[in-house]
Structure formats: C-alpha cells, structure tokens
Amino acid sequence: MLKPGNNLGLGDIGPLLDNHPIVASAPCRIDFGGTLDISSFHYPLRHLAPSTVNIALDRRTTVSLGPTTAERIRVSSAGIADATFSPSEAPYDHPLGLMFAVSDYFGARGVHIHIHSASPPQSGLGGSSVAAIALIAAFSKLLGRMGKTEIPRKQMVLLAHAIEQGAAGVPCGLQDQLAAAFGGVHAWTWTADPCRPPFAGRSLLKGKSLERLDRHLLLAYLGVTHVSRDVNNTWIRQFIAACGRENWHAIIHLTNAFATAIAGWDMRAAVQAMNRETAIRKAMTPQVLDDMGDRLVSAAIQAGCGARFTGAGGGGCLWAIGEVHDMAALKPVWKEILAERPTAGVIDCRVDNQGVL
C-alpha cells in the first residue's frame, strides 16, 4: 500500500494495462441501524454499544482498469457522461469525483476506469462506497502485478472511508465499505476508541443459513433516486442540537435486538424490531418515505413482515424480512403497488458471502 506522503505514486500505468485489463467487483448491501456508523453518533453513544447490521447482496459493482491516452484519467459509468481530467485536477464534487479522488491517492495516470453497477443509481444500497472499494481492489491487483504488496480488505475499508469522507467534506459512515469488502451478514460494532480499529465485526449467519435467508428477504426499488446526505445531515444536526437523542438510544437497542434475532433465526422478533425502528425514523424525518414507500411499509406490516428503507431513505430502495409464507404473500402486493411507477419494481437478489473480488 502506498504510504502517506509518498509522492511517487503509480505513475503512467497505461502500458501495464494494454491488452491486460484489471477487473474487481464488490457487493451492495441492505442495512439496519445505519447512521450509527457515523462518528458523530457512536462516540458520544459509546456506552450503549452502538452497532449496525448489514446484509451484502449479489448485485455487484464491477470496476475495470484499461489504458487511455495522454496520461490522463478517464472514468466511464452508465447514466453519467464520461469524464476525463489530468491527475489531481478533477473536482471531487463531480458525480464521479470519488473515483478521481481514489485514483489521485494512488498517483495513477494513463488509466481508463470503467464502472458497471448491477444496482439502480442512487438507490440507497451503498453504491459510491461499493465502487470505491472495487476501484481500490483493482489498484491493489495492479500493485500485485507490479510485484508490490496488495492491500488487505480491512485496509481497503479504512482507505475507502478516509478518501470518501475527505472528498465529501462531511462525516461519512463505514458500513457500506465493510459490506462491500467482507460480504455476508454482519453486526458491526463501532468501537469509538482512537487506540483501536474503528469497527469490530460479528458474523450473524454462515454457510447454508445464508442461502436459507434469501427466501426471507424482499427488495424493491421505488423508482426515484435518493441523496443520503440530505437526511443524514438532518439527523446529525438534530443529534448535535440534543433533539431527540432518546430516539437514537432506542435505535441502538432495536439494532442489537435485530442482530440477536437474526443470529437466533427468530424472524418474528426481527420483524418487530424492524417495524419499531422504521417508525422511529419516520417520526424524526417524515421524508424518509414517500407515499409509495408508506404504502409498501403498510402492506408489509399487514402481511406480518418487517419493512425498512435502505441507507438514509428519501427514495431509493425498501427491503422487507419475515417468515417465508408471509414473504410469499407480500411479494405480489408489492409488485402491484410498484407497477404504478414505470421505473419501480422488485429487485431479484441473493445474499452475497464473498465480498470484494
């Protein structure tokens, strides 16, 4: 891994990629107890043992590195116009700015970065963070091709988070990067100790249980994009102003209860915890669910299932959990509601146990 202050960087890597592209990919995630991974929350709430549960899904973001001309950096991603800049000259507030920030960290030039995501854009599934992990993994493979030490997954997470938080200019969480790097179903505890790593993970399900979980999950895209920064900034401002802090105490309790329920395969307890957490967040910030989202959540509750928005809500995706027979009854109801919006629909997916590849 490049050391801080090392100005040498990778340099012109175009010749290394000519006829030999490098490909890496990482999974997206659904989550429970998000926002607690932001340090604004988990440091002052450390005494309550805040944690976040995430489930990695096989809707992967794939990044490939190929050569480009003039020793510049070019980034291509579906739905966004290609962008090309000289090293260190890209604006990081560009829609593809995070990718340029990662490339600048590695001191790369002469590279064409292709990004393909199997998830809808801005869907609340951790997209930009997933792409950052995949891009770092691709550069790590390049380091290996050059005979240098590749980057361990834990370091990928810390690096991706640091670059994203710096480029965004606002506090960012860690759960998206962790799910992308490690996959599976985890409860991540936020240690809030500057002398230790910022997270500790516990796998909630393993082996055949991961495949079994697929039948207990349902994911829907609302057909409208979301911007997590808007809702997260509202929550951060409220928390700093001592507004509704008791809600975050309850969310921590419910997240830990949800993790215990999943690990113990108690779907009824998981459903109850999820619906209570969703209701608390909706009361704090009504904009986390639009009218369609409200109807989907209501349908899930009527079917005996739990439902929650992904990420910070305000568009993007919703996911549901419950017993298999309840989920089977819910799916056609959700499809009927989602059919009212041409861009919306149920997303076929399964739990991903591999993480970044």
Image (tube, grey):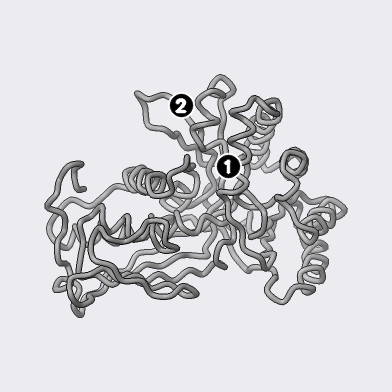
**Farthest residue, direction right:** 302
Residue that badge 1 annotates: 233
Q: Is residue 253 above or below residue 235?
A: above
Q: Residue at x 54, y 39 (%)?
A: 187
Q: Residue at x 42, y 61 (%)?
A: 94
- Residue 274 visible in the shown view: no
Q: Horizontal placement of 324 versus 148: left or right?
A: right
Secondary structure found at label 1: helix
**Farthest residue, direction top:** 47
- Are the residues at dot 2 and dot 1 in contact (C-beta closer than 8 Å)? no
Q: Horizontal placement of 353 versus 162: left or right?
A: right
Quadrant where the C terminus is found in the figure: bottom left
Tell me the number on the disc at residue 192: 2
Q: Is residue 323 above or below residue 220?
A: above
Secondary structure found at label 2: loop
Q: Position of residue 294 (x, y in %)?
A: 80, 55
Q: Dot 2, how many residues are within 10 Å of its Cα: few (below 14), some (14-19), or many (20+)?
A: many
